[in-house]
Structures are given as structure tokens and as C-alpha cells.
Image (tube, helix red, strand yellow):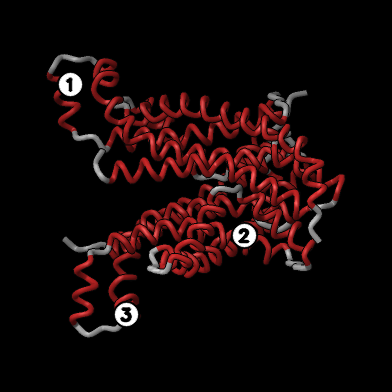
Amino acid sequence: MAYQLDFSVIIKHLPLFLKGVFLTVEISFLAIILGLPIGILGAVARTSKFKIFNLLGAIYVEVFRNTPLLIQIFIIFFGLPGIGIKLSPYVSGLTALVLYVGAYNTEVIRAGLEAVPRGQVEAAKSLGLTGVQTFLYIIIPQAFRISLPALGNNWVSLVKNSSLVSVIGMVELTWVAFDLNALTFRSFELFGAATIFYLILILILINIQAYVEKRISYKT
Amino acid sequence: MFDFGVIAKNLPYLLSGVQFTIALASLVIILGTFLGIILGLSKLSDNPLMRYPASLIVEITRDTPIIMQMFFIFFGLPALGIRLQTFPAAALAMSLFAAGNTAEIVRGAIDSLPRGQFDAAKSLGMNYFQMMIYVIIPQALRRMIPPAMGLFTTLIKDTSLAAIIGAFELTRAGQEVIERTFRSLEIYLVVAAIYFIICYPLSYYTRKMEKQRAMGF
């Protein structure tokens, strides 16, 4: 018997799908926001004059960038209870995503910091700004502008990577599709629909990023 | 607390998983590069019948999670009568993902070459293939290598996702050991360390090459 495509399963379970989409958006958004300070902190450590901060920053970046996110999620959720740290799936998943995107942000923001011309720092000093003021008002805005395209790539990867928190039971888009599949066996329709939802989310994100990039770019 | 005996005892089993991780990654890198070059060149083609389908494939494979593509191929395709085992399903899904990303690297590298190179090749009377093989590809290749190596590192890490559909590789091997021993922390840390040992040299050389390129070599 040939398989009959039946997309009514999507319509029927649309509320659950939208709930999944909402959670995917929520954790991605939180991880994007929380990943920025981590990235800035990491980048400051990586460009620090103190060897020890530099080394710690390097270890953080290399460890998180050279191991699979899936394993990081497993270590936080299944591994840490072994030493007495029990975290909920939500907190585990979000922590893993934030640390992972933070490591990638660190490298991007570091490159941004290094690309700000030295003259800017000297000009700020000659205006009498303190070190912190120089960093906050002169360096960061320019570094952010330089880093934004690469940060945008990290964010796109992040939304895709948020699918992995389904493996520890977070009811986001991937989990919903997987769960409904077990219930209805409408694999083709369900995973097709979930794929399209992701595609829409990512395209929205890419367009927001392109818009912001255009708004804050130098007017020539 | 920590039990290191369990690591020593199960290391051979984990290493048997590493073989499959490396096999899967190699297969994906070879297939993905091959398909990616074809897709990338199609995206640059003047023929809309080549350009639009290629762009569509690239967008779908790049802008959706690999795990979705794996589920789609492993659970979804049997509905259309195409039934794949776990390992081939993972390899196919990841190869498509690799191809989409490679295509963008190829397109980006060729697009970044000065237009004069194309004009010069044409004015010498070269046809498309001569122009590509003797003029464009050799120059574009140098720009492709650092991002391609970055992609390879990502792909090696992402082979861990094959465990979710049950394909046997390093992550799955780790899960099996944990099902027997219940030592999640130790085993997952060792698994992470093994991935690190495989990926770190690759990402180290990628960075070195990027630096050299930035200095103009």
C-alpha cells in the first residue's frame, strides 16, 4: 500500500507546534542575549596583558569549540549530578547553549576589539576618558559594529543548535516533531513542517541582522 | 566520586566507536566537498535552471538543524519507500549539510576574485572549463581552504548527532558504556576529550592558515 501524505496532522497539532516554536525562540533569544556578555568577558580575557586571564580565556574557547555541543549538554545534564550539581533540563540546555555560543562570540569579539584602530584609544585618552569609559564608549561600539556580521552567523548556528536540547527533554520544536512522530507516524509531514518552521525562524533572524547591520553601518 | 577504573576498562570500546566517527566524518567530508563544488558552481551559473534549484538546496541545508535533516531522512523517507540504515541515513543527511555549506564557501571564494580575472581568461579565448581549471579554481582554492577546514571541524563534532538516530560511533559507544556502568560524568568527559584530541589540531592549523592569509601569504 502506498503511503498517503496527510498534512491534516500538522493542522490538528498546530497549537503544540507553535508552543514548540515559542520555546525554540525563547531559549535562542535568551542564549543570544546571555552569550554576548560572556563573549565580551572572554574577549577581554583573551586580549588581557595578564598571562593567566589570557590562558583561561584560551582554554575556555578551545574546549567549548572543539567538543560537540551534544556532549556538553550530556555532561551538564547527566554528568554533573554525579558531583552533586542537579540542574533542570531547561537550565542545563540553556547553560550549554550560552557557554557554547559564548566561546564562538569570544573569538569574534576579540577580532573586533583588535580591529579597532589604536588611534581611537589614544584619542579617548587625550580627551581625558578613563580606561573603563574608553572601553564602554569608544571600543565596544566600534568593535560591535565590526563583529556584527560574524556574530550573526553565530546566532544562526545557535538557533539550529537549540534543536539539540530536545535530547534532554525540552519541549521545543524538534521535540514536538519527534513526539508527534511517535504518536502518529506521520514522519514525512511532521519533520517537513518542523524543517519549514526552522527555515522561517532563521530567515527572520537573518533579515533582522541584515537590517541592524545596515542601520548601524557607517554612512558613506 | 570519580572512578577512573571504569574509564580504563571501557576505553577500547570507546576507541572502536572512534573508528566509526572517523569513517563517518571522512565519508561526509568527501561526499560533501564533491557535491558542494557542484552546487557552488551551479549557484554561480548564468542559467537560472541551474541557479535557482542549487540556491534552494543550499538554503534548506544551511538554514535548518542537521538533526532535523537526519530525522527527515531516517524517519521521513521510508514513507516514500526509501528505507536507510542508521549509518547511511546519518551519512546522507550530514553530506547534504556539508554540501550546502561547502557550496557557500566555493561561491564566496570565487565571488571574491577580481572580475578582471574572468575577463582576462575570456579574452585569451578560454572556454568555461579552461577558465575555471587554469585561472579561477587555483586562486579561489587558497581562499577556500581555511573556511573549509573550519567546516570539517564542525562536521567532525556534528557526527555525534548520528547517535540520536542510533548510529554507532563515539557518542553512541559512550552512551552504551554508561547504560552498563552508570558513570555518566567520567565517560562523557573522556568522550569529550577524544573529540577534542581529534578536532583541536585541525582548528589550530585553520587558525594558523587564517593568520598567514591575513598577512598576505
- CA gap, disc 1 and disc 2: 50 Å
Q: What SS does tag 2 mark?
A: helix
Packing grade of label 2 (10 A; few <14, some 14-19, many >=20) is many
Q: Quadrant of the C terminus of chain B?
A: top left
- CA gap, disc 1 and disc 3: 54 Å
| Residue A117 found in image quarter | bottom left
Image location (x, y in percent) of residue B136: 26, 26
* Horizontal arrangement in the rendering, residue A49 relative to residue A216 (left or right): right
Q: According to the image, label 2 marks what residue?
A: A96
Q: Give whichever of A213, A128 is nearer the camera.
A: A128
Give the letter of the chain under mark 3: A
Q: According to the image, label 1 marks what residue?
A: B121
Image location (x, y in percent) of residue B75: 71, 35
Q: According to the image, label 3 marks what residue?
A: A131
Image location (x, y in percent) of residue A67: 59, 48
Q: What SS does tag 1 mark?
A: helix
Packing grade of label 3 (10 A; few <14, some 14-19, many >=20) is few
Residue at screen point 35% across, 80% down? A132
